[in-house]
Image (cartoon, rainbow, N blue to C red):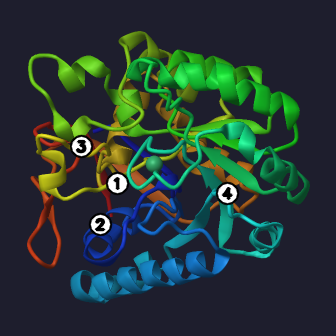
């Protein structure tokens, strides 16, 4: 049986939601990730360091209360899960708030969403350029900018929106602010891979398991699979394959793990007007391992999952380890909130090749 032991991974792009949903999904992350960067798109969004600290506290409390229920004998193993926070970039963001971000040990980045591009993102502002004043200050204070890079021009085809954003918004911005540290989040195209590789070391990218494991046929051909529907959309095979080459490459330092796990209740996914977002946290590592193994690059999984992101964010490397074995296993049909509402993962209906042992 094939297996691999790696330094315990971190998830540098995670949606944990709040309340009941938070309680239902937190263990799927704290179970096998040491740290995570938690996205701020709650309703209302997290826009101040104070709100972020309160949210962080709710996450840690939820994690502990879930552990007391399901792993009472082993709480400390998973209670060390450390969520880092982000603020939602908006036109009200003041210099004083940015100063507070730079001094906060809990807030690692500011997140840009194009208005309306994803769940609860209607607070963003469409013009990337309108934030140049903020970017200038972030560059000086060395605050990381996380970017959802898709054009929101309704005339642009939805499959072309990432490429268009690079050309119209991202490229001019990185030229103007070469010292601003930027994460191009959940990249989905060969254009994005090329863009990130062409930039200096301050521009990096997070990559999800779904964009590495699936192309758009897996979402749309024959039957519609709503649990694989996410923003940005899955793209062509050539894009998927370019992403795989980038993350598995021997010299890869610019690409790291960010699941973009984004849980929704089943009714919001299996719907005549369904939400974008893959609930990937519980099986993300199994899918990443599958991709690296298929590429003959399992030995590079640790760089991607456990080292590159920590280095970029200037954090120490984790000390614990995590073991994965190659063994067929059936993922759970659904996860459930206290009220009995179901959440279905993105691998629903599949047999997985890899499994975490612990
Ligand atoms: Zn996201």
**What secondary structure is found at the residue carrying circle 3?**
loop
Of callouts 2 and 4, which one flags the residue occurring earlier in the amino acid sequence? 2
Residue depth check, mark 2 versus mark 4: number of the one nearer the observer: 4
Q: Distance between the residues labelled 3 and 1?
A: 9 Å
Q: Distance between the residues labelled 2 and 1?
A: 8 Å
Of callouts 1 and 4, which one flags the residue occurring earlier in the amino acid sequence? 4
**What secondary structure is found at the residue carrying circle 1?**
loop
* Residue underneath mark 4: 91
Q: Distance between the residues labelled 4 and 3?
A: 34 Å
* In-front residue for pair 312/125: 125
Residue depth check, mark 4 versus mark 3: number of the one nearer the observer: 4
Of callouts 3 and 2, which one flags the residue occurring earlier in the amino acid sequence? 2
Q: Where is residue 241 in the image (x, y as percent from the top left)?
A: 44, 16
| Callout 4 touching callout 3 (CB < 8 Å) | no
Q: Position of residue 201 (x, y in %)?
A: 80, 35
Horizontal placement of 49 versus 236: left or right? right
């Amino acid at each position: 049986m094939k297996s691999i032991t790696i330094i315990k991974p971190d998830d540098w792009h995670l949606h944990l939601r709040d309340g009941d949903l938070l309680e239902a999904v937190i263990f799927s992350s704290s179970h096998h990730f040491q740290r995570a960067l938690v996205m701020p798109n709650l309703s209302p969004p997290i826009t101040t360091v104070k709100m972020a600290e309160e949210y962080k506290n709710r996450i840690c409390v939820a994690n502990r209360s879930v552990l007391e229920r399901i792993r009472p004998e082993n709480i400390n193993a998973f209670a060390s899960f450390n969520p880092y926070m982000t603020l939602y970039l908006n036109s009200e963001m003041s210099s004083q708030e940015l100063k507070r971000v730079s001094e906060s040990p809990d807030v690692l980045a500011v997140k840009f969403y194009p208005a309306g591009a994803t769940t609860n993102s209607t607070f963003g502002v469409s013009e990337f350029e309108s934030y140049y004043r903020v970017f200038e200050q972030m560059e000086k204070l060395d605050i990381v900018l996380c970017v959802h890079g898709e054009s929101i021009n309704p005339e642009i085809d939805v499959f072309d929106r990432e490429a268009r954003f690079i050309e119209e918004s991202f490229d001019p911005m990185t030229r103007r602010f070469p010292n601003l540290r930027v994460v191009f989040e959940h990249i989905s195209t060969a254009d994005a891979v090329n863009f990130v590789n062409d930039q200096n070391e301050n521009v990096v990218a997070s990559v999800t398991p779904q964009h590495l494991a699936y192309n758009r046929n897996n979402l749309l051909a024959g039957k519609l699979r709503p649990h694989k529907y996410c923003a940005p959309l899955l793209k062509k095979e050539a894009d998927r394959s370019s992403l795989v080459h980038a993350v598995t490459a021997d010299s890869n330092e610019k690409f790291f793990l960010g699941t973009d796990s984004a849980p929704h209740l089943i009714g919001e996914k299996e719907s005549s007007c369904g939400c974008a977002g893959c609930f990937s946290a519980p099986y993300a590592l199994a899918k990443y391992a599958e991709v690296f193994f298929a590429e003959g690059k399992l030995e590079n999984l640790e760089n991607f999952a456990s080292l590159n992101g920590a280095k970029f964010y200037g954090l120490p490397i984790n000390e614990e380890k995590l073991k994965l074995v190659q063994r067929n296993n059936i993922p759970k049909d659904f996860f459930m909130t206290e009220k009995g509402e179901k959440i279905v993962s993105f691998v629903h209906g599949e047999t997985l090749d890899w499994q975490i042992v612990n």
